[in-house]
Image: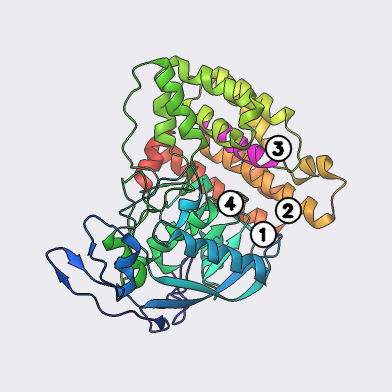
């Protein structure tokens, strides 16, 4: 991994200011004394019991507020992020890290135990970069972007993270090894939580099992709880020389088996609508398949327009379960999808989902047909026909993105897709696509050789 210059090593979310002396103290209240679990922190006679956390915001008034300048780099194919937009994103992240920051949101709980971090992230400029194509699919692409001299690197999509050590279609942020990248998200409620989460990893924090924690692997508008240890590291990130293994794909405990079909539906619905910061859990999705009703319910959700924004993750869950019915439905979904703004996110996930489905049991009768289906979609010209009305740059961006996802599907299949990928490589004119196809050939070979085509074993072995 490449190291950043002093004060530039940050994560997708913040400049590495505290450890290198770049943080500025912008305010400090009187020092707090503690006796018997109480402290007077704000110059008033109000006693504060930190264990009770009431009033919790008073606890942090004894701490100086630190200002950290943040430089933001935005890939040229990410639209709509200027100085004002980037400043707004940082202010939203600051709000998340305040004590009870989101209580104005009606559905959020008033967390009495939530502590304010006491750090203000402030914009130090936005620059556009042109490294890569805006979609990170390989380690090499990740390293190129991560090495840029920005504290936040914003890209269109992220399928590789140094902490996952493998490809995954739904990664939203990565902050391992003191460097970071985040994906531009349309959900302004969840996005600042993802940024705060990634900065937590950079600072040295691991995932939390607390369902309200900002470090839970699932981001949510109300998942903002910060405890004392977390606050300490947010304020003074660890300066360990060794890489910190603070995030991981998978490895989390599976949900307990639901006792009824209604309870199973509740679990599945929550799972596919959650914001999975480091990727939807293949293991959990596959575990749902032990219950026949799970696939039936997921297929129904894929037809439901109410869940349109979640169709991509629903497709991935269907792919993890696999089987002939799953492959046939995913194939039809890809064929029927329009290449437009509404359908594109789900289409980009449905292609690798077909690879997941091919790697699952009971896929054999449809393997050759589905591999050919994916191989046809590794040609740029195939996708450009559907977006002829767009500008040349937009056509190229969409076509290359979908080609990459089809190649990922071939790689994930665990079947011998090297010939298809070799042919795609031979016909590719773009140098980045050539490198992508070569990478996916290696992935496909590794899955076959090290895991016998079992994608679950491959993921487990890469952690």
Q: Which comes sooner in the sequence, label 1 or label 3?
A: 1
Residue under numbered circle 2: 397
Looking at the rendered image, the quarter that the N terminus falls into is: bottom left
Camera-near label (1 vs 3) is: 3
Q: Nearer the viewer, residue 92 or 14?
A: 92
Foreground: disc 3 or disc 4:
3
Q: Earlier in the sequence, mark 3 or mark 2?
A: 3
Q: Are marks 4 and 2 in contact (CB under 8 Å)?
A: no
Q: Which mark is residue 343?
A: 3
Q: Position of residue 167 (x, y in %)?
A: 50, 48
In magenta, the rendered stretch is: 344-358
Q: Secondary structure at mark 3?
A: loop
Report the number of numbered marks.
4
Mark 3, residues whose alpha carbon is within 10 Å: few (<14), some, or many (≥20)?
A: some
Residue that badge 1 annotates: 133
Q: Residue at left 58%, top 24%?
A: 301
CB within 8 Å, label 3 to label 2: no
The mark nearer the N terminus, 1 or 4, is 1
Towards the viewer: 444 or 191: 191
Q: Is residue 368 left or right of residue 47?
A: right
């Amino acid at each position: 991994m490449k190291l950043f210059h002093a004060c530039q090593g940050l994560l997708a979310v913040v400049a590495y200011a505290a450890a290198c002396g770049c943080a500025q103290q912008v305010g400090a209240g009187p020092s707090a004394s503690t006796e018997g679990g109480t402290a007077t922190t704000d110059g008033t006679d109000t006693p504060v019991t930190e264990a009770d956390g009431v009033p919790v915001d008073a606890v942090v008034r004894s701490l100086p507020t630190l200002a950290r300048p943040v430089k933001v780099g935005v890939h040229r194919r990410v639209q709509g992020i200027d100085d004002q937009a980037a400043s707004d994103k940082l202010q939203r992240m600051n709000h998340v890290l305040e004590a009870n920051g989101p209580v104005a949101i009606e559905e959020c709980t008033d967390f009495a135990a939530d502590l304010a971090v006491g750090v203000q992230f402030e914009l130090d400029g936005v620059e556009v970069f042109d490294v890569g194509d805006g979609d990170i699919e390989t380690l090499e692409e990740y390293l190129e972007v991560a090495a840029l001299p920005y504290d936040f690197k914003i890209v269109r999509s992220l399928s590789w993270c140094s902490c996952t050590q493998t490809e995954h279609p739904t990664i939203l942020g990565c902050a391992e090894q003191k460097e970071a990248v985040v994906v531009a998200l349309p959900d302004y409620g969840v996005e600042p939580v993802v940024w705060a989460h990634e900065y937590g990893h950079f600072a040295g924090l691991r995932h939390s099992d607390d369902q309200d924690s900002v470090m839970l692997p699932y981001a949510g508008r109300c998942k903002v709880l910060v405890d004392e240890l977390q606050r300490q590291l947010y304020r003074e990130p660890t300066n360990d020389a060794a890489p910190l293994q603070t995030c991981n794909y998978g490895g989390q405990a599976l949900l307990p088996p639901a006792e009824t079909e209604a309870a199973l539906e509740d679990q599945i619905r929550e799972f596919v609508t959650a914001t999975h910061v480091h990727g939807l859990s293949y293991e959990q999705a596959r575990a749902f398949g032990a219950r026949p009703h799970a696939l039936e319910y997921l297929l129904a959700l894929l037809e439901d327009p109410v869940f349109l924004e979640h169709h991509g993750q629903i497709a991935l869950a269907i792919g993890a379960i696999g089987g002939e019915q799953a492959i046939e439905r995913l194939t039809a979904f890809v064929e029927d999808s329009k290449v437009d703004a509404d359908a594109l996110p789900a289409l980009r996930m449905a292609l690798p989902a077909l690879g997941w489905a091919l790697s699952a049991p009971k896929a054999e009768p449809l393997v050759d047909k589905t591999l050919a289906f994916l191989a046809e979609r590794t040609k740029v010209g195939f996708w450009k026909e559907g977006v002829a009305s767009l500008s040349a740059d937009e056509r190229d961006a969409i076509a290359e993105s979908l080609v990459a996802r089809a190649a990922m599907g071939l790689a994930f299949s665990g079947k011998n897709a090297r010939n298809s990928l070799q042919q795609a490589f031979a016909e590719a004119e773009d140098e980045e696509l050539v490198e992508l196809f070569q990478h996916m050939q290696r992935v496909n070979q590794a899955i076959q050789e090290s895991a016998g085509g079992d994608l679950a074993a491959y993921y487990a072995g890469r952690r």
